[in-house]
Amino acid sequence: MVVQRQRVLVDRCLADDLVIPFTLLVIAATNQQLLAPGLDKNSPATRSLLQRWGRLHAVRSVVSLIAAGLFLALAIGV
């Protein structure tokens, strides 16, 4: 049981710790492009960037939910 709890804790920490680098290394580049002063807000390129940002944010959200679920499992002793 202790080994299983340690495994859940390690998995939770890994999932949680992946969110920050993913945000800084992957999502930040898209954010910078979206925040560019000369960006035409009605262009197909902007639409594509927003769709990309949405997919990336979904990945980040799912990883965060997994980390939260693992934390809850650890907290209730599953």
Image (tube, grey):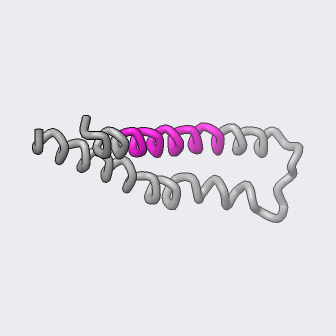
State the extent of the magenta-drawn residues as a range.
Answer: 52-69
Extreme-bottom residue of the structure? 37
Q: Is residue 58 magenta?
A: yes
Write the residue at 39% across / 39% down. Answer: 69
Write the residue at 69% across / 37% down. Answer: 51
x, y percentage for residue 12? 32, 47
x, y percentage for residue 28? 59, 59
- Depicted 65 relative to depicted 18: above or below: above
Q: Is residue 48 magenta?
A: no
Quadrant containing the N terminus is top left
Write the residue at 51% across / 61% down. Answer: 24
**Quarter of the rendering containing residue 32:** bottom right
Q: Relative to residue 41, is residue 23 drawn left or right?
A: left
The secondary structure that dominates the magenta segment is helix
Residue closest to the eye, 14 or 78? 78
x, y percentage for residue 44? 81, 38
Give the number of callouts.
0
Quadrant containing the C terminus is top left
Q: Relative to residue 28, is residue 10 drawn left or right?
A: left
